Amino acid sequence: MKQQIKATMLKRLRWYSALLMALLCAAECAALFFFPLELVTHFALHIILLVSLCSFAFPSRWRFITWALAVAVIIFAILPFSDGTKAESGTKIIAYNMHFENAHKEKEANLLLHSKADMLALLEAGGTQWQEPLHTLRQHYPHTCGHEDDSPFAMQLLSRQPLQACEVGFFDIYPYIRAVTADKRTIFLLHPPPPVSRELAQGRLNYFRDAAAAIANEENAVLVVGDLNNTPYSPTYHRFKRNARVADALPHATPTWKPLLLALDRVLYRQGKVFATPLPWQHSDHRPIWIEWQ
């Protein structure tokens, strides 16, 4: 009886694992065309690790294939490697989705002030609820531009030093910020909509298409930061990165959004040197990212 139960459990584990792998393969192939499957791709690391844990249910040959695949995905997850070298003479930036309904706005503002960053690239900060903490920040970061809106698409870019340009633009109805520093480098702050419906998923694809074209046309060194509502496991992310001609500065699997620990907040660049690392979670559901840009 025990042997029958064990055999049944192993068989079910094999089937569940095979179904998960088939779902992930289908998602990676169809992500550009079918948004529900595209959502599955963001959990590629989770799925591979889960299947690897269940690999004892497979015959040895398939077990080794599963382990090899897991190793390949884990290596991809920790790329690009960081040498840990900071750009001592570079511009220090904090990029942070502060969460529009954050109940600890003043504490967040104080954290940012104590960071001694040269620039702040803030998402979901704006409108009536954020007037006081933003006023506090602007006393120390007088060179600013932002989208003042009572919605999660509010955004701000604040700088201690003068900027050659700082402007809010829109890809369709969704805002972005483009700023040019005194040494003629360009920074983009992006926040496409989350793909939680067909309409929003298409809006995100359109946002990526237009943003990639704008970024690719920049002749200067470029830094792209923001909550992209996308992860490096999705083909839509790689198409954006390829079309924009930028490279990742953060390891692919750096968890920046809880509770699912997805790598939604990204730092990408073209030319120069960028050091980026996540800071501890504060009162938002996203982690602030520390960036040094040389």
Image (tube, grey):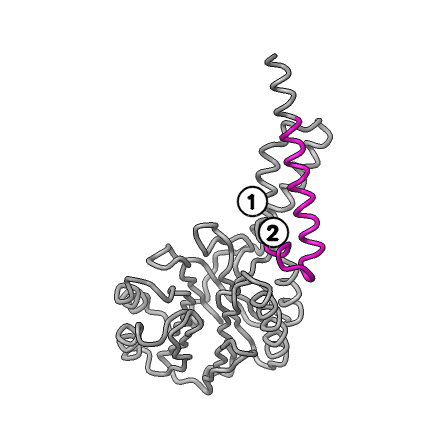
Asked if residue 51 is positioned above or below residue 116 in the image, the reply reads above
Residue at image point 58% right, 70% down: 203
Q: Tell which of 113 and 193 is nearer to you.
A: 193
**36 magenta-colored:** yes
Q: CA distance from mark 2 to mark 1?
A: 10 Å
- Image mark count: 2
Residue 194 located left or right of residue 3 = left
Magenta part, dominant SS: helix
- Residue 69 shown left or right of residue 269 in the figure: right
Mark 2 or mark 1: which is in front? 2
Tell me if residue 219 comes above or below residue 32 in the rendering: below
Q: Secondary structure at mark 2?
A: helix
Magenta-span inclusion, residue 147: no
According to the image, label 1 marks what residue?
Answer: 46
Relative image position of residue 265 (x, y in whole percent):
49, 62
Given the image, on which type of amino acid does mark 1 rest?
His
Where residue 139 sits, quadrant-wise, is: bottom left
Identify which residue is drawn at 67% across, 40% down. 19
Question: Relative to 208, is 80 above or below?
Answer: above
Span shown in magenta: 11-39
Quarter of the figure that contains the N terminus: top right
Q: Secondary structure at mark 1?
A: helix
Query: In the drawing, what numbered circle is on residue 40?
Result: 2
The amino acid pointed to by label 2 is: Val
Position of residue 102 in the picture relative to residue 235 (left or right):
left
Q: Residue at x 64, y 36 (%)?
A: 17
Residue found farthest to the right: 61
The x, y position of residue 264, in whole percent, is 51, 59
Q: Quadrant of residue 205?
A: bottom right
Residue shown at the point (60%, 71%) measured from the top left: 208
Image coords of residue 157 (percent x, y): 41, 76
Neighbour tally class for label 1: few under 14, some 14-19, many 20 plus, Cα within 10 Å: some
